[in-house]
């Protein structure tokens, strides 16, 4: 926030966010120890709902809810003592433990679903049709922005499984979108060594510990730095993650002394082309022989 607001404005915006949080927690009943008039607080109810009818392994459960293992264990023990949940080891991998709802737990989850519907209806009912439409649209926008704020971006070794997943997803998507397919062996290289410091770097974006995007840099002594391997998962597109990755790449490049960034792209990647132009990149004559490129862009970091 300090990038966009003065100290006074930042204080006011933070106050607005806190007021919004207080209103929401009160309106949805999060302040009550007996959430939805049941005999358990909101945290336990949410874990019960998240486990679902098919069960959920504890690693995924922690990731989805952003809970540390100790707190999640306490919530699960409380649910186990009430006879709602069983935790068992995975038969294929003893290190993996899975939480399952008992028949009593499934019945309790059904009650929570019904009461959640009733709560949602009680929020909407006093409002006019126009107000309901505005509220639901605003909720959708808030949800998208909260998800966007949850994404974490960090430099990752390109040999890491998260990095390999992103790079393979990038190659797979290019193969689907390019008219003649894509063979990265024919493309100008950006291998693991070239995306490892000091030769370069790779940023990986994660959401709830799952990889959802990447972008890399290749450094060249005395020459412009190249942006490579920009990819965002279709599941999180529309959250501004592409722009965030590009901005972070620019910051990293500047930190390592780069004055100019260059990149090339294919004509079929229309969203990427729009992103680069909106971010201040201007089209230049071809500066390499990339066989899959139709557009070449450059931006001065000064």
Image (cartoon, grey):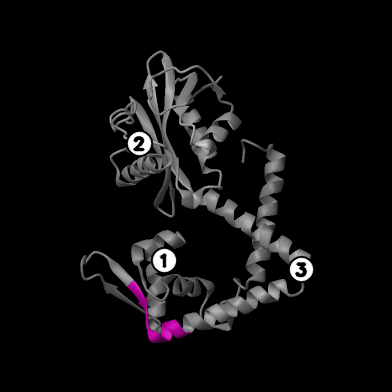
Q: Residue furthest top?
A: 222
Residue 49 location, x and y as percent? 47, 73
Disc 2 designates what residue?
182
Q: Which of marks 3 and 1 is nearer the N terminus?
A: 1
Mark 2 nearby-residue class (10 Å; few <14, some 14–19, many ≥20): some
Q: Residue furthest front?
A: 180
Disc 3 designates what residue?
129
Contact check, label 3 and label 1, Cβ < 8 Å: no
Q: In this view, does 236 lie to the left or right of 201?
A: right
Disc 1 designates what residue?
71
Which marked residue is nearer to the observer: mark 2 or mark 3? 2
Q: Is mark 3 on a helix, strand or loop?
A: helix
Q: In this view, does 82 lie to the left or right of 128?
A: left
Q: In this view, does 65 lie to the left or right of 188?
A: right
Q: Is mark 1 on a helix, strand or loop?
A: helix
Residue 101 colored magenta?
yes
104 vs 242: above or below: below
The residue that appears at 53% across and 73% down in the rendered structure is 42
Quadrant where the C terminus is found in the figure: top right
Q: How many marks?
A: 3
Which marked residue is nearer to the observer: mark 3 or mark 1? 3
Q: Can residue 16 be seen in this view?
A: yes
Report the span colored magenta: 99-107
Which marked residue is nearer to the observer: mark 1 or mark 2? 2
């Amino acid at each position: 926030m300090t990038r966009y607001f003065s100290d006074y404005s930042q204080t006011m915006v933070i106050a607005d966010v806190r007021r919004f949080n207080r209103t929401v927690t009160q309106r949805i009943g999060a302040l009550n120890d007996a959430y939805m008039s049941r005999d358990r607080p909101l945290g336990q109810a949410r874990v019960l709902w998240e486990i679902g009818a098919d069960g959920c392994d504890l690693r995924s459960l922690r990731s989805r809810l952003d809970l540390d293992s100790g707190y999640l264990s306490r919530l699960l023990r409380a649910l186990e003592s009430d006879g709602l949940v069983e935790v068992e080891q995975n038969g294929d991998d003893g290190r993996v433990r899975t939480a399952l709802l008992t028949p009593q737990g499934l019945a309790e989850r059904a009650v929570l679903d019904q009461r959640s519907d009733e709560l949602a209806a009680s929020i909407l009912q006093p409002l006019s049709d126009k107000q309901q439409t505005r509220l639901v649209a605003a909720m959708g926008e808030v949800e998208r922005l909260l998800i966007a704020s949850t994404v974490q971006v960090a430099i990752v070794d390109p040999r890491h499984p998260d990095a390999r997943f992103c790079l393979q997803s990038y190659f797979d998507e290019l193969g689907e979108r390019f008219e003649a397919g894509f063979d990265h062996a024919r493309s100008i290289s950006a291998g693991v060594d070239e995306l490892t410091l000091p030769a370069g770097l790779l940023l990986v974006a994660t959401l709830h510990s799952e990889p959802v995007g990447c972008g890399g840099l290749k450094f060249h002594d005395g020459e412009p730095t190249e942006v490579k391997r920009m990819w965002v998962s279709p599941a999180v597109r529309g959250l501004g993650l592409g722009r965030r990755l590009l901005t972070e790449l620019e910051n990293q490049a500047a930190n390592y002394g780069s004055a100019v960034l260059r990149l090339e792209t294919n004509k079929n990647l229309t969203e990427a082309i729009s992103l680069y132009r909106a971010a201040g990149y201007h089209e230049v004559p071809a500066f390499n022989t990339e066989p899959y490129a139709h557009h070449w862009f450059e931006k001065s970091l000064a």
